[in-house]
Image: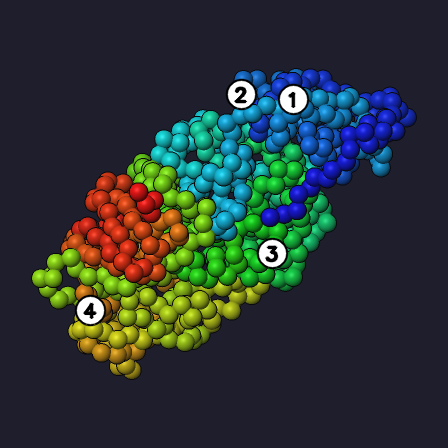
Amino acid sequence: MRKNQFTFLPFLVFLLLFQAQVESANGKDDIKFSLHKASTKIVKLYQKIEFDIIASGPWKCPTDYTEVSIGAELHSPSGRIILVDAFWFQDYKNDTEEEKGSPYFKIRFAPSEIGKYEGYLFCHYAGKKHVSDKLSFKSIASSNRGFIRQAKANPFAFEYDNGELFFPMGINKPYGSPLSFKQSLEKMSKSGGSLVRVWHPAKFTLVDSKTGNGPHKVDQVMAMQLDKVIELAKKNNVTLTIAMENQRNFRKILQGKPSAFWANNVFTKANGGTIGEDSDFWTDPVVVAHMRNRLRYVLARYAYSTSVFSWHTGNEMDFIKAKSMKIFTKWHERFFADAAKHDIYDHLVHQSMAWFNGYDEINRLPGSDLNCGNIYHTKDCAQVADFIKTHWANKYGKPVLIGEYGVSKQKNKEDLGIQCDPKALIAHNLTWGMLANGIGASGMSFWTRYIEKYNQYTLFAPVRDFLRAVPLNKHLWKAVQVNSFLYANDSEKESYGETFLNTYRGHLVLSGNGALPPYQVTKNGTVDAAVYGQVGGGGYNVMAPKWPELYGPKEFCIDMASDGFCHLYIAACSDKVRINAECDGEMVLDKTLTPKNKKLLKLGHVNEKVSFPLSAGKHKITLSSKGPKSNFYEYAISFENHRKLTGPDLQVRGIQCEEGILLWLKRPKFNYFCEMYGEELSSVAEGNLILDGIAEGNYQGTWIDSFSGDKKMKVNTKTNNASLSISVPRTNSAIAIYLAKKANP
């Protein structure tokens, strides 16, 4: 956590300093300012109180804090000194964009202590401090839970100031009218969704030469809209993570073409500004000063709200080229330091990267409270969650939040990317996979319509209801130890299980000229983590990416339990790409892929399944490709009859603490990818799962279908020498249970 900004001074010293600093409001600098009105004299804990200030002076830009800084010095009941920035504010009539009166300075504050607050107004201008009216108000108790923090007992989870668990899961809704937000937030509230990512500050200056706005200026209409969205979020018990910038505003080339965003950017030399290249964003004094000033304005205007979950740097900021990692890192360090200095409520603050694994230099920064990245073209997000726990959460000791995820970012009239996953299995598997790995956060789907088109808001409800009984933030959880997983009925026939391996960009990607160590497919159907973790680390546009390390022929070493098949599910590639497969040095597949659906090709989907037989025993399989843009392959691989089964074919994920056990069991091929290929999953037989290392006691819980929330089976069981036997119901999808330890009678 960041160092608190408050200090302690006796109130008598405050009075003496106040008397010594008082200057006439009509001094020689012609600075005039005074309190016009306060919204109340009594305010509830964590609720908003406002002070409207009438001020005039020789300043040119009232939204430039380096020119003029108006605010209040408040003294809390315990004696803390709190410096609160004012901000420039334009009121509007009702919910219209018609201005109401003249703009003025406003202060917003939310008390965190019960009792009397006292203070005064001040104005910093031209190196001098002017002081004016005294302030006083009283704070009383409320039911507000407070601000959201990293959990004290579990570094991978979040909680409110009152200790209540907060589990973030939701949607991206960058912009939109307050009415459109009202509809989405009401649906979120009813279903249990808790977090929406908004990008309004990226349009505060409009970064548009046609508007006449420039550095430090603020679009008051956009700022007003964010006010409305925050009010709606509070009403619907939903929180917001607020992005400060959109990387598109500072890129000369987008998707191979000159960018319209860059053409209208007020900071470019072509528009009378100072930057000529993308990389200037990180170092140009004018742009840097503008970004720092805008952050301070946003904090002054919105930080009072407990409906704000976090601030983050912006959308996919690593897409803006930087000349070195040192420059990139320094910019982020400054952002985190500025947020810590000016956010008197100490909200969570973090980066947000396009590159899934992020960058080690940024991930480890102490000023960032959590790590955030995006995932697309992902076949089974449950396997992604496994990777996140090992290579992201554990490594840095911080929570992890997925900023964006989905089948595809691309938009078109048919919404084909959404049609690939009408059940929102990506969202389901990501959320439950993160939870079952002990990570107290999920992510935000991209875009809102991914959730809205098929009313997929309902997927949040089972998670919300399930977590009501789980003390996720109260303990440091550890992974469960599986002793055995057998059929409940000994008469079940011998069978074999299929291993499905998730892939996504930067992991198991075909083609190119590079080479990696072979992927060792383990007997339990996973990829050796040591090799898996070497792929997909930083790169993109920050510095020249080492493509040979990311893209190249891929080798899989596997030991088949029985004769079977290797299946390749080709989802995305360019037209007329040739795929090759060798098994133990012998060519077994040489096929040219031509998309059957040209509309799907626009999204990069060909949806073709190709297979070749594999005999029992050990094999080395090499995959490669040739053709135009063949390094953009998106695919998955599975091995039929790879594993000999002694129990139900379910993947077991789970965590435990001294109070209980959380389990999530999933069919290996219960994911959107196999759903898209029309593969129906049969129900597996009932089973008996035995865990080791369990605290002695009685445990009770109810299995639910994690997709629908329907109850499946009650379990009442007792440990035997630190082992626990758990009955498992039939399922063709995924099930979950929280087994709470019951006190001895």
| Comparing labels 1 and 4, the label whose residue is closer to the camera | 1
**Mark 2 or 3, nearer chain start:** 2
Residue annotated with mark 2: 96
**Mark 4 or 3, nearer chain start:** 3
Name the residue at the bottom extreme: 585
Q: Residue 575: which quarter of the image?
A: bottom left
| Residue 431, x across and y down, in percent | 37, 48
Left/right of residue 357 with respect to residue 138 in the rendered view: left
Residue annotated with mark 3: 365
Residue annotated with mark 1: 138
* Image quarter in which the C terminus is found: top left
| Mark 1 vs mark 4, CA separation in Å | 69 Å
Q: Residues within 10 Å of mark 4 (few under 14, many from 20)?
A: some
Q: How is the image coloured?
A: rainbow
Identify the amino acid type marked 3. Answer: Leu
**Mark 1 or 2, nearer chain start:** 2
The residue depicted at 29 percent of the width and 66 percent of the height is 525
Marks 3 and 4: in contact by CB < 8 Å? no
Residue annotated with mark 4: 644
Identify the amino acid type marked 4. Answer: Lys
| Mark 4 vs mark 3, CA separation in Å | 45 Å
| Disc 4, SS | strand
The residue depicted at 38 percent of the width and 58 percent of the height is 479
